[in-house]
Image (cartoon, grey):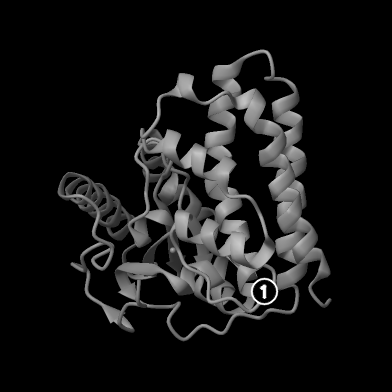
Amino acid sequence: MMEAAASEASAEATPAAAARPATGERVFMEKLLNQLSEKLKKAYGERLVSIVLYGSAAVGDRDQKFSDFNVLCVLSQISRHELADSEEIFRWWREQGNPAPLLLSEREVQTCTDCFAMEFHDIKAQHSVLYGKDVILDLAVDDSFYRAQVEHELRAKLLRLRQKASGMLSDKDLLRRLLADSLSTFCVLFRHGLILSGVEAKMKKREILEQAQQAFGIDPLPFQKLLDLREERIKPRELDPVLLLDSYLKEISVVIDAVDRIAK
C-alpha cells in the first residue's frame, strides 16, 4: 500500500519499482515475486488478467520479521478448476511465510468495493502491477459502508487482542510478540480513521502515528516502542509488554471513539 502503475503493465514489470527498500531486500522481493508470477502465468494462461502486489511491500515499509507479501490475483473466471490449478502454487507461497494470494474475478473486483472499501482504498493508494493490466487504476471505491467497516474492524481487532493477551500475561515473550504483530493492523486501521476524518493520510507507520497524534490526540509512545522493537532499535528485554499493555489498549480505544463520532 506509490503512484498507481500504468493501465497496462508488461509481463516483465518490476515489482514495487517505486518503493525502494535496501538492495538485498529488493533483490529478494523481486526474485520471489517473479517466481510467483511465473508460476501463476503457467497455471492460468489466458485466464490470468492481472497480478497486483499491495501492502507494506508495495510502499517500501515491509519488515522482514513481521511483514509478508500481499498479492491480488485477478482471473477471468473462478471455478473449482482454477482453485485446483492454484493448489500447489498457494501451498508453496504459504511455505515462504506469506498468506495465499487473493483470488478475485475481474467482475468481482468491479462489484465488491462496497464490502471491502478499506482494502480497495489501500490497494488503490499503493500497489504495483506484477503482470497484466491495472484493474485498480480506474476503479471507483463505493464508500457506503466505509466508516462502519473501519469501526467494526477496530473494535473486532481490539476484542481479539484482549482475548489473546488474557492468556499470555504470564509469558512476556509471547505477549511481546503478540503486541508487535498487532501493530501493523492497527496502523492500517488508524490510517483509515484519518482518511474518514478528512486527513490526507500517509502510508508509513511512523508517519501515520504522528498524524493520529495530531488528529485524535493519542499518545504515540506505546506504538513507537513497538516499532523500535520491530526495527531492532531496542532489545526485547528493554520493553516490558505487561506494562505497555494498558497504554496500548487505551490509545486504540481513543481512535475507536474518534471514528465512532464521525457522522454516520
Identify the residue shown where x is 58% and y is 40%. 222
Q: In which quarter of the image is the C terminus?
A: bottom right
Name the residue tied to disc 1. 196
Q: Position of residue 145 (x, y in %)?
A: 75, 73
Q: Which of 194 and 55 is in front in this view?
A: 194
Task: Answer with left or right where residue 39 lies relative to residue 182.
Answer: left
Q: In which quarter of the image is the N terminus?
A: bottom left
Identify the residue shown where x is 52% and y is 71%. 201
Using the rendered view, name the quadrant where residue 178 is placed: top right
Dot 1 falls on a residue whose secondary structure is: helix
Q: Does residue 68 appear in this view?
A: yes
Task: Answer with left or right where residue 192 lies relative to residue 235.
Answer: right
Q: In this view, does 46 lie above or below 20?
A: below
Q: Position of residue 144 (x, y in %)?
A: 74, 79
Identify the residue shown where x is 58% and y is 72%. 108
Q: Where is residue 203 in the image (x, y as percent from the top left)?
A: 45, 64
Q: Position of residue 102 (x, y in %)?
A: 50, 56
Seen as rendered, the residue at the extreme top is 170
Q: Does residue 50 appear in this view?
A: no
Identify the residue shown where x is 58% and y is 34%. 179
Q: Nearer the viewer, residue 143 or 109?
A: 143
Q: In this view, does 164 lie above or below 134?
A: above
Q: Is residue 142 above or below residue 36?
A: below
Q: Which of 92 and 68 is in front in this view?
A: 68
Q: Residues within 10 Å of mark 1 (few under 14, many from 20)?
A: some
Task: Answer with left or right where residue 115 lies relative to residue 52.
Answer: right
| Circle 1: residue type | Leu
